[in-house]
Image (spheres, rainbow, N blue to C red):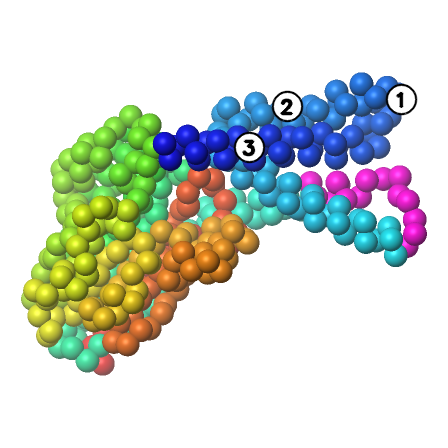
Amino acid sequence: MGMYIWYGFLIGMIVIQAVYFVFRVKRFYFVEKLSRGSKRAQFAIASIPSLVLIVLAFVNMVHTAIVGMYLFMIWLLCDLVGVIIRKFTKKSYKIYFAGIAAVLITVVFFGYGYYNAHDIKKTEITVKTDKEIGPDGLKIALFTDSHVGTMFDGKEFQKISKDIMKSNPDIVLIGGDYVDDDTTKQEMLDATKALGEMKTKYGVYMVMGNHDGAYFNYRNFSTNDLRKELAKNGVVLLEDNLKDINGKFTLVGRKDKSSRNRMPIQDLMIPVKKSSYSIVLDHQPNDFDAEAKAKPDLVLCGHTHGGQLIPLGWTTELFHTNDCRYGEVKRGDTTFFTSSGIAGWGIPYKTGCISEYVIINVKQK
């Protein structure tokens, strides 16, 4: 049912955009010239971009709807600015500057977004503790939200994994949404093979995200296929359970918030020794109050993509859909870090934040 509502919403958006673009493209000077005074010809020529939009929607509905929505919003804004300028100048302009500006701004916006999304950076942070963890501490490599197939395929991910390993981490943590709803089986196999080639002191651990379980269930492999491939390549999947790391650290992996039978963090933390430095891996940053009360030392999240696109990401803060959009937050004795991820969902663009993997140095004070 959720899939039909989602696609109904996307189709509605595309229809509204298509109608608006017809009436706005009609105002371009070249359309008026080509139509030679014929209203029917003018309407037919102006309809061409909207027909292209509809055809593209059959290729990739999400991509088309989002790009079209931004062009629609920017065009509305440019039209509003045009109305204000004409009111104050009391002039009528033959050239449709608002339409030209809207198209150019949209092209620049998504051009920058494409470059920024694919320019994966290394973010390095240091977290200090009073606990006895030894002089070497722990170097963690965290990556989240790879959504394999959206911004890069499985083969390209192999190159990214090699970049991550250049930092020589002690342990690799995967914060969920490793694959996406339309990741192909071959992409999943290629990417998971790269995980098997990550050689670290303490291994590779992962928690599931909301998309790893396949929201819409139209990819050509099952969640169990993913589990088997992860296990075959030495990746330990943590789902509401713990893992002791060298007697000084405890890794707590949570089921995703979307899971119906997820354990409360307070219950998960009961077996953790107070002397152990505890790290919680939780895909969605949505349970900070309870996690702060449970007092783990460090909580690592993803899911938000750092906002992905301005201004859509800001709505998560406006409506409090997440406890944090991006970055480091301190609550009581617990440090929270929400990563923007190495990719994003649905479209290969990021304007709200960088693409990143995170190197976390846990050090004793």
Residue 232 belongs to the span the image colors magenta: no
Q: Name the amino acid type tagged 2.
A: Leu
Dot in front, 2 or 3: 3
Question: In the shown orientation, is residue 363 left or right of residue 33?
Answer: left
Residue range of the region highlighted in magenta in the rendering? 89-103
Q: Which residue is mark 2?
A: 51
Image position, residue 37 (x, y; %): 89, 22
Residues at discs 2 and 1 in contact (Cβ within 8 Å)? no
Residue 95 belongs to the span the image colors magenta: yes
Q: Name the amino acid type tagged 3.
A: Gly
User: For the point 44% across and 35% down, which residue is it?
Assistant: 6
Q: Name the amino acid type tagged 1.
A: Gly
Q: Which residue is mark 1?
A: 37
Image position, residue 316 (x, y; %): 45, 56
Question: Quadrant of the image for the N terminus?
Answer: top left
Q: Is residue 246 visible?
A: no
Q: Dot 3: within a 10 Å radius of its alpha carbon, few (fewer than 14), some, or many (20 or more) residues?
A: few
Q: Mark 3 vs mark 1: which is more N-terminal?
A: 3
User: For the point 81% across and 27% down, which residue is it?
Assistant: 31
